[in-house]
Image (cartoon, rainbow, N blue to C red):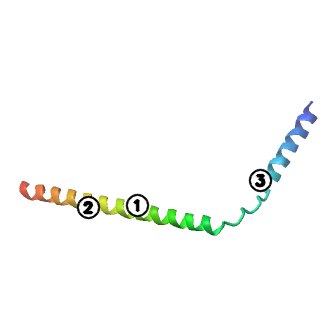
Amino acid sequence: MKKILAVLTAGLMIGAIAASHAKLPAPPPKSDAEKAADAEKAKASKAKEAELLNKYMDKAVANHKKNTASMDRKK
């Protein structure tokens, strides 16, 4: 019984090692339409991030001005 378990365990280990070294096939090349769609998606994402960055920068500046003004009155 112990021999059977040892053989099964060894086989499992060999299979795990073989699976970890397996090489996946390369993905198919993208067509021009897919490349254009990806570029458009990246452009839209970049524009949205810039818009959000400007929004939160304005919010931070307004918060800083508000807090600085209130700190000056306390003195």
The image quarter containing residue 54 is bottom left
Assess whether mark 1 and mark 2 are in contact (beta carbons under 8 angstroms): no
Give the CA separation, mark 3 to mark 1.
Answer: 40 Å
Query: Which part of the image, by quadrant, shows the N terminus?
Result: top right
Q: Nearer the viewer, mark 3 or mark 1?
A: 1
Disc 3 element: helix
Q: Does label 3 or label 2 sit earlier along the sequence? A: 3
- The residue carrying mark 2 is 58
Residue drawn at 72 percent across, 63 percent down: 28
Q: Does label 2 or label 1 sit earlier along the sequence? A: 1
- The residue carrying mark 1 is 48
Q: Does label 3 or label 1 sit earlier along the sequence? A: 3
Give the CA separation, mark 3 to mark 2.
Answer: 50 Å
The image quarter containing residue 22 is bottom right
Judge left or right: residue 47 versus residue 3: left
Residue 15 in the image, given as x and y percentages of width and height: 84, 47
Q: Nearer the viewer, mark 2 or mark 1?
A: 1
